[in-house]
Image (cartoon, rainbow, N blue to C red):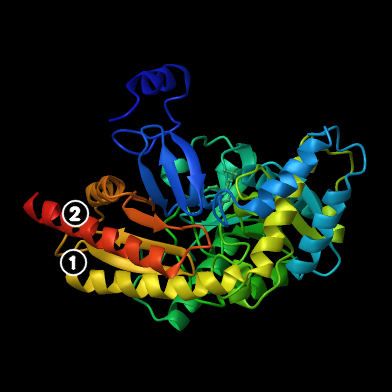
Amino acid sequence: MTDSDLLSRHRAVLPDWLALYYSEPIEIVRAQGRRVTDSLGRTYLDFFAGILTNAIGYDVREISDAVRAQLDTGVLHTSTLYLIRRQVELAERIAELSGIPGAKVFFTNSGTEANETALMLATQYRRSNQVLALRNSYHGRAFATVGVTGNRGWSASALSPVKVSYVHGGYRYRGPFAGLSDADYVAACVDDLRDVLATTTSGDVAALIAEPIQGVGGFNVPPDGLLGAFKEVLDEHGILLISDEVQTGWGRTGEHFWGIEAHGVTPDVMTFAKGLGNGLAIGGVVARGEVMDCLGANSISTFGGNPVATAGAKATLDYLLDNDLQGNAAKLGDRIIAGLRDLGDRYGVVGDVRGKGLMIGVELVEPGGTEPSPPAAGVVLEETKARGLLVGKGGLHNNVIRLAPPMTLTDEEAGEALDILGEAIAVADEERRRA
Ligand code: PMP
């Protein structure tokens, strides 16, 4: 059952490309902890957390109190033309956490806007509109970011103002470098980077932008150190490294606070969004001071870093750090990955299980082979929902189930999700065998 009136009004007035999940889309009207309730009173365990926006769960008193205190002043926002105390405090925290020497921070309202800003800074700083990006990447929906997005399904416009060359370096399950050892994969990707630089660019490239673990692309985990190996090549040419931490930031990967740390390298620029606001719209860029300050004119975001968003963000950051949610993500991530690998041993429809912390992908294939199976992913999406679990989908072929619950997840909830996933995967396996 779905609210068919609301659905037809949605379809009439919102764009066709604004995709909705589920054959019967749901409307979430209440939430608490890691559970959300829809308009028909059904409750679900949320293993997608609003595409990772909800870092610490719903209805958290510390966050609501911080936001409410700001609302009570009567100031939702005036203007970033005036001093905003909490914006300064949050920028100081993020600059320090970034590890980038002499870092400066600029706040935006989304990840797209953060990456647009990062690309504008890098191209301006380097006086070049040539950019490198990874195949299978996703960096946003606006003009430059859609250009550096290396995933056909999300390349909504081909008219980007940046000249982009794509390199290998995210996805390992398929493609010419599939099956290589970590060391050989890194070596092959570095060779590819050198080749792409030499053959498709003039050499004076502005930046390489990369997600340390690709999100929309299907939670693709490269070998640790890959982006560090890339940075050595980039440094030979003065090319900046932009780490897109929109999904991998704030400890979600478990072992590190930022995804890039697994690569043993400090980037020149990092972008962030999603989890920082725990549902409020906030994003931003943190960059080396000289890169941040290279613009030759004024630039302002009317709402970026407004008092309400920064109140929620600061409370979220405090909560994340005070409660070691990174440690919780590491522990429960390991448990869920192990549980899914067991399912992989039992069901041929599971082609690959990968991830770090609470960023876990299950790539589904036609049983008996490795052909991508978007229908199997569709079955798992519907069957988990029918059993009270929300999960995400992604990957180049739309055949990867993505799991990214709030980082406050409990052991019991992890077990509950694994049980439901086991049942849903069994149904998908059976259906694809019969198909
Ligand atoms: N970068 C990455 C890695 C993302 O996953 C996303 C959103 N899925 C974005 C950028 C764009 O963020 P937003 O949707 O907030 O504009």
| Image position of 211 (left or right of 94) | left
In this picture, is 263 found above or below 309?
below
| Image position of 220 (left or right of 341) | right
Q: Are marks 1 and 2 in contact (CB under 8 Å)?
A: yes
| Image position of 189 (left or right of 418) | right
Residue at the spot of label 2? 428
Query: Which residue does the image show at 86% across and 34% down from the upper left?
Result: 79
Which label's residue is closer to the chain start, 1 or 2?
A: 1
Q: Secondary structure at mark 1?
A: loop
Query: On the rendered image, what quadrant is the N terminus found in?
Result: top left
Residue at the spot of label 1? 347
In the image, 322 versus 356, the foreground residue is: 322
* Residue found at the far left of this picture: 434
Query: Which residue does the image show at 53% across and 71% down from the upper left?
Result: 328
Query: Which residue does the image show at 38% across and 48% down from the upper left?
Result: 44
Q: Secondary structure at mark 2?
A: helix
Q: Amino acid at mark 1?
A: Tyr
In the image, 36 versus 342, the foreground residue is: 36
| Image position of 77 (left or right of 136) | right
